[in-house]
Amino acid sequence: MLQSDNMTSSTPVLLPQLGLEVTEGRVNAVLVEVGAHVTRDQPLVELETDKAVTDVVAPEDGVVASIEVAPGDTVPVGTVLLTLGTAAAAEPTTTGPPAEPVVPASNGAPPPAAAPPAAATPSPAGPPPAATDAPTRRRVAPVARRAAAKLGVDLAGLTGTGPRGRVTLYDVEAAAAAAPAPAAADGREELTTTRRAIARRMTASQLIPQYHLVRDVDATHLLAVKVAHAGVGVNDLLIQAIAETAVRHPALATAYVDDDPPYLQRRESIDVGLAVATDRGLVVPVVRAAHEQGLATIAADRKQLVASARAGRLSLEAMSGGAITLSSLAALGVDRFTAMVNPGESTIVAVGRTTEKLVPRGRTIAIVPTLTITLSFDHRVVDGAVGAAALAELADLLEGGMTWRP
């Protein structure tokens, strides 16, 4: 532990609760030193969890009184990372050298006189030597430095995306992913933190008793609304319609909690998660209160969340508390697919690309843009009839029954 004695009070900075499933974090880097003056919301410690990298920031202005952790430490939620204090007032000083104490000699003789101070040596005439610029030390998180050595990444060629240009673990892993991978002797590949988290969640998802319902939706109205609202995409329309469906069918925003005894937890706010593929794996940022937001706000939130996710700077708060999730593979040319329910939710909506299909219309056949939607449900929460009614409701909203909030 590093600490300073010149403090009058201290405020502990704890590892906060960063989502229901996050119980610990790994310290990637400590971004301040003991004695440093910091301001409110200044990053203090860079943490990595199984979901993302995030910064713990200063709750107030102050001075770093002590640092309780070191890079590489894995600590549980609630651990004191460091403390902030207020600098103590300096002790008053007197001018001139301090007086020497008089100590009697053991034989009773007076003590010897103190030697006079040596005369100062005059400095040679002429200008002072020119100051030289000290070499700038590259800011690299320790965990990033270790990863670079392991992955063979040249740190000199990286541009840091962390605070004040610090090279982070994400920068190193992104550079390693972009480089041609050398052939391994045994084909062994270590799992990243994110990939381990995905594996755990998908294994947990397999334990959920799930069923799936599929329906083709006439996308004519949906595409017309998209054209009428500049900057709004199909996913933004889907998010608003899914939230409206969950309002009308509350079971879609209710989670089964496997406690003793188990119970159902209903979400009052319909926060819609959006599955986003990144270089490090799948993450699910959340659009908050989608049942209340207009299309313009949803579109702006969605774009910001996707950009942060792909840059590796998505906060844990941005991935927590989803009520229902949308997963779309339309951009990858997939027609239809089945998604797995996220633990802690009861419903996920899987959407493929829009294709033109021949559809009977009376005695004629029309070419109709068609979107295939697959809903997966937790059968402990959503009965089959309830799920079917919800799918029919969502299809009706997308085909023209929705009053869109701009």
Image: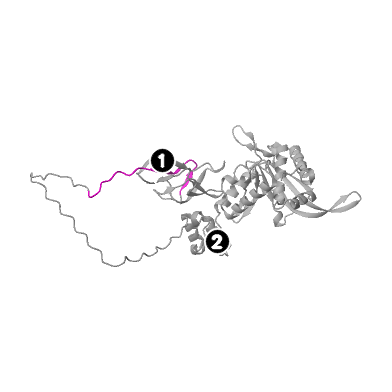
Q: Nearer the viewer, residue 93 or 348?
A: 93
Gap between marks 2 and 1, in whole Å?
A: 40 Å
- The answer to whether residue 373 is visible is yes
Which residue in the protein does label 1 denote?
10
Q: Are the residues flagged by discs 2 and 1 in contact, CB closer than 8 Å?
A: no
Residue 24: % across, % down: 51, 44
Closer to the N terminus: mark 2 or mark 1?
Answer: 1
Q: Residue at x 62, y 48 (%)?
A: 285
Secondary element under disc 1, as helix, strand or loop, is strand
Name which residue type carries label 2.
Ala
Q: Nearer the viewer, mark 2 or mark 1?
A: 1
Tell me the magenta residue range.
Answer: 73-97
Q: Nearer the viewer, residue 219 or 108?
A: 108
Which mark is drawn over residue 175?
2
Q: Nearer the viewer, residue 52 or 214?
A: 52
For label 2, the crowd category at 10 Å Cα-Cα, with few meaning under 14, some 14 to 19 and many 20 or more, is many
Q: Is residue 348 above or below residue 138?
A: above
